[in-house]
Image (tube, grey):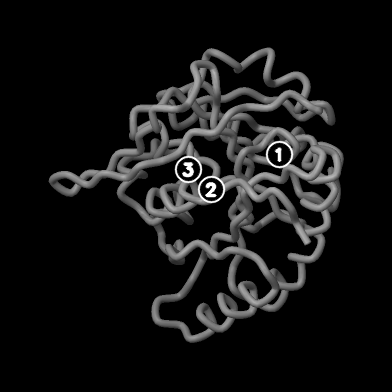
Amino acid sequence: MPARFGIYQSKSVRTDGNTEIRRSGHAEAGDMLVITTLNLKGGSSKTTSAAFIAHALHESGLKVLAVDADGENESLLQWGSLGEWPFPTIGMAVPNLHRQLPGIANGKYDAVVIDTPPMKEQRSIVLSAARLATHVVCPMAPTPMEYNRLPAVRQLLVDVAELRDGDAPAFAVLFTRTISNAASTEVYREMVAEDGDYVLKPTVGRLERYAQAFGMPIENALNSAYGDAVIELLDLDVQKEIA
């Protein structure tokens, strides 16, 4: 079995308009939450999703490490530097990430968020990042083109489960770049659900806040759609089997 991390169960608490993500008492010291964002191709909001998820976890009080596994673009790494993020971001675009990262991060961080390269070009790196994950998020717009990419993502998760003796990470689809009140969003939600995938209830709208965010500091991520999404994500149980 590859190196494995225990999972933090989330508990969302809203007080005076603020949201917190707390660990459950049974999590052992040194266990880490590992969220990997992935999709078949670029332009799917993987990096933006990873950035806002990492900040939501940081704002909740967790000690976060962001990992850029896209060696060609290094967008997360650049964003972390330009935006002067309050937690470290490292580059690790290697096909044995699942073996190297635990030695670097385990015992030092509560949560790791991994941004991956396009799966079509760098499948071995994405597979390694998914092998390490407790949770996998596939950001996608509710469009025919991006819907048609999901079977490749499912196959990668099947491969991950086989490499982990049937123990798969929790998986969810997150709709991004959505248009307010568009009927197509709910149509694709039903289609993806019928295919057997979990779709997170929050959707990330096509907003300037996200489109123009690269290179800028990120604030109040926990009280955004991404904060709501990560809270729901962490409430999912790890899937033991993928059909």
Query: Would you call the spot at circle 1 few (<14 residues within 10 Å), some (14-19), or many (20 or more)?
Result: few
Question: How far apart in space, not on screen, are marks 1 and 3 (Cα)?
Answer: 19 Å
Image: 23 above or below 109? below
> How many C-alpha atoms fall within 10 Å of the one at disc 2: few (<14), some, or many (≥20)?
many
- Residue displayed at 48% across by 33% down: 8
Question: Nearer the viewer's eye, disc 2 or disc 3?
Answer: 3
What's under tag 2, amino acid-wise? Thr
In the rendered image, residue 153, in percent from the top left (x then y), is placed at 76, 57
**Residue at the image point whose x is 69% and y is 13% from the top:** 103
| Local SS, label 1 | loop
Q: Which residue is mark 3?
A: 53
At 60% from the left and 17% from the top, the residue drawn is 105
Q: Which amino acid, mark 3?
A: Ile
Provide the secondary structure element on which disc 3 rests: helix
Could you say which quadrant of the image residue 129 lies in?
Answer: top right
Q: Earlier in the sequence, mark 2 or mark 3?
A: 2
**From what the image shows, is residue 224 above or below residue 141?**
above
Q: Are marks 2 and 3 in contact (CB under 8 Å)?
A: no
Residue, disc 1: 73
Residue 39 in the image: state x and y as whole percent.
Answer: 71, 54
Front disc: 2 or 1: 2
Q: In terms of image quadrants, where is residue 133?
A: top right
**SS at mark 2?**
helix
Pick the front one: 235 or 108: 235
**Quarter holding the N terminus?**
top right
How far apart are the alpha carbons under marks 2 and 3?
8 Å
Give the position of the C terminus as an image quadrant: bottom right
Q: Is residue 74 above or below residue 175?
A: above
Depth check: give the residue in front, 149 or 7.
Answer: 7
Q: Residue at x 17, y 44 (%)?
A: 15
Indicate which label's residue lies in the foreground, 1 or 3: 3
**Residue at the disc numbered 2:** 48
